[in-house]
Every structure is written in C-alpha cells, then in structure tokens.
Amino acid sequence: MMNTRTFAGGLHPPDLKTTGGAAIVTLPPPKKVVLPLSQHIGAPGKPLVAVGATVEKGQKLSEPGGFVSAPVHASIAGKVVALGNFMHPFGVASTAIVIEGSAEPEKPLSPVAVDGLSLPDDEIRKRIQEAGLVGMGGATFPTHVKLSPPAAKPIDSVILNGVECEPALTADHRLMLEEPDKIVTGLKLIMKVLKAKKGYIGIEANKPDAIRLLDEKVKGEENLAVIPLEVKYPQGGEKQLIAAVLGREVPSGGLPMDVGVVVQNVATAAAIHDAVFFQVPLIERVVTLAGSCVQKPGNYRVRLGTPVADFIAAAGGLKPDIPLAKVIMGGPMMGLALFDLNVPVIKGTSGLLCWSAQEASLREEKTCIRCGRCIEACPMHLLPQRLKSLVDKQKWADAGGLGILDCMECGCCAYTCPANLPLVQSFKLGKKVVLAERKREADAQKPKGN
C-alpha cells in the first residue's frame, strides 16, 4: 500500500478524470490568434509591434510593463491585423494583439541547444524571463520573479506541483508521463538558481503510473524525491502542498519563501527546460478538453491565443445531440464559466470543460443551518459562514480581522454547503473591498505635500 501525505481540511469531490489515458495530441496552428498582453499576475506588457506588421512564430510581441510582468510571443507566423481591447477570459476588456496566419507553410523554430545546467544563474533567469514563462498551474505568477527571492529569505527546498487535484483535469498527468526528463531537468534548473539543497515532486496517489515513472527518473539522486500524496482537494494549493510535503506552515499573509520554499507547477518546469536549453518561448501549452458535450475528450497541445471555439472545433467539435449549457476554463472548483467562446486560450488555461445542463445544474440557495461543514472543509482554517455574514453586513474591518484575505477561493466551503450559499463570490467581493479600504487608509496616513 502506498504511503501518502496530506494536509488538514479539504474534501473529496468526484475526480471525473476520464482523459488520463489520452495521449497529448498536437493541434495544427489556428488561422487566427488573439494574444492578450496580460496573461500573468502583475503589470500588462507594452506592445512592440503595430497593425500591419509581419511577425514570425516565436517573435516577441511585447516587453514587460515592470519587474512583475512577462512578455508575450507570436504563437503563429502572420500579419498583425488588430491591436486594441478584446474580451479576456477573466470577463474584462484587455489590450491584445490579433494575428492572422500566413498562407505559407509554417516554418519550425530553429533553437540552438546548450547545456542549460552549465549556464550562470543570471543567464538562466534571463532566458526564463525572455521566454515569457509564468506559473502554468493557473496562478500565472511570472516565473523569473519567483526565482528571484530576496537575500534575506534563502530557499532550501523546491517542490514541483504534480498534484492536479482539480476534478476532470489530466494535462499535467499526461505531461509527467510523456515528458518526465524535461520536468526533472526543469526542477534541477530551479534548484540551481535558488541554491536549494532539496527538490520534491508531489503527486497524488491517483496517478500511480506518474509516481512510478518519476520515481525511476530520480533514482540515485540523493537530493531529489517523489512524494505520493493523498487524493484530496485542494492538495495542489501551495500552502497545502508545503504542509503535506515538508510539514511547514506558511504564516497568515505570508508566502512560501517565508518558510524557505518555492513551488512550481510541473508544466512550468518542462517549459523552463525548453526556455533555458533551447530558448523556446512560451507559445503553446497542454490543455484538457472534457465534458459530455465533447466529441473527442482528451489532452491537446494548443497554441496560445487560439479562440476557444476554434480549439473545440479543431479537437473534433461538440456532440450534436447534447446541448451545450456551460463552458468552464480551468477546473470545476476554481475555473471560470465563459461568457463568450471567442475568448482565447492563455498561458494559465489548464482545461476546458464543455458541460451539459445536467452537469452544470444550479442548486437553489437556502438559509444557512449552521452545520459547520464549511469550517471542517476549509483548508485555510477560516470561519466561512461568519465571514459571509460580515461581508453581507459590509463589516469590512471585521472581515479583514477574521482573515478573509487568507481565503484561497478554492470552493471547498461552497461545495460542501447544504444551503448552497454563494460563499466564494462573497469572499471575492470582500477581499477586494478589504484591500481597497486598507489602501485608502494607508494613503490617508501618508504626509501630504506642501
């Protein structure tokens, strides 16, 4: 029997992982891409091209808008036909570059291979930054920033997140099976830059084939280990993963670096390998396509900027006899329900779920019965019912004092709530207002100029 580790709290939703046996299929380049200049946490990029410009695949289209920012690259060769505001998957208009593909056959990238592990640390970081890498598990934090912690916070351990705890998603699982060497080398690159002594790959026990394969890949490496984890949501949350693997608790309001740890997704590690060894920019990613409405559910390597409707069509389309009720970008617990299928696949897109009305059924909201299930399930050990009451009453200071900013919006509370309360929506609102109130108070205390 496999020895597994876990964290306190969380729950066990049905895993719905029907595509784990589907090998990655590379889709042909789309005819058009829409590339938002903000596909990451932080400042949007600044465009480097104008309408009418001819661009090559892999060409840098934007420069970072600050240190916490990342460039965007052309995912196809063609002509820039538009530069302006287009709808983003997050539901807001965002500056994007639109490219129409060339009629000429696509030329492959011609990377020059080097031994990335022999490069100086600064050159490794530079290549990662130039490639536009961000966290590909969904958080999209610029990778070069994570690999540049302050000297006062030394890193002793790196954890690769191969958990993929969201129901229905299997893209990371397939990547671990098909590109394990890239993932292990990416881990070594991260450790080299951070001067970390230990590296771990955390994988949930429902992926025994990935655990066996990666365990074989790190055999004989004294500073590397694969850690089997209990199948529980949200086992892939950074703080939960650190608690399970290392038994360390990230303080309230703190970051993993505060306990000497950096966490990266396995897909990010594979992309780091390509960026450092071959200077290949991030222009495509593996995405799970699933749901009862899909003709050919599976895992697809798709170009960034591909409109969702075009992606679904290229992957086999929808079933004509099952009406489509909802499309979710990401997983069912933390993903976003899309309002428009013309929005593009972006760097943080791990999955697309095409659900029927039965799968997407809405439950009627009722009165809280104070059962305490949300408290038991919360992986951050908060009081969800009390926090919702404070948000409803607009008691923002009290909500802040009770730790609303520590909420990771994982959805455990809402999933387990028998009253079907919209808890996550309340906390998203509350967090925004609490942050705005604190900023307003801080600005008011600043000395005013003469």
Image (cartoon, helix red, strand yellow):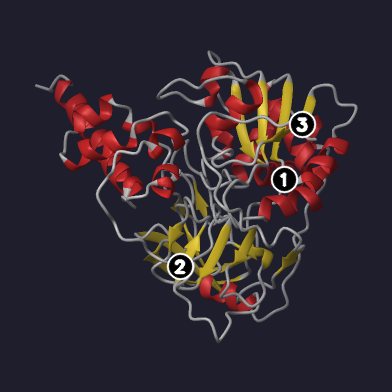
- Element at badge 3? loop
Which of marks 1 and 3 precedes in the sequence? 3
**Is residue 150 visible to the viewer in this orientation of the structure?**
no
Q: Is residue 400 above or below residue 359?
A: above
On the image, which quarter does residue 133 sit in? top right
User: Residue 96, how many percent across, how many down?
Assistant: 44, 62
User: Residue 217, how many percent across, how many down?
Assistant: 86, 37
Q: What's the residue type where badge 1 is placed?
A: Ala
Quote the CA–CA distance across marks 2 and 1.
Answer: 26 Å
Q: Nearer the viewer, mark 3 or mark 1?
A: 1
Identify the disc placed on residue 270.
1
Which of marks 3 and 2 precedes in the sequence? 3
- Element at badge 1? helix
User: Residue 381, how many percent across, how many down?
Assistant: 42, 28
User: What residue does disc 2 label?
Assistant: 343
Q: Quadrant of the C terminus?
A: top left
Q: Nearer the viewer, residue 141 or 56?
A: 141
- Element at badge 2? loop
Q: Nearer the viewer, residue 184 or 322?
A: 322
Quote the CA–CA distance across marks 2 and 3.
Answer: 38 Å
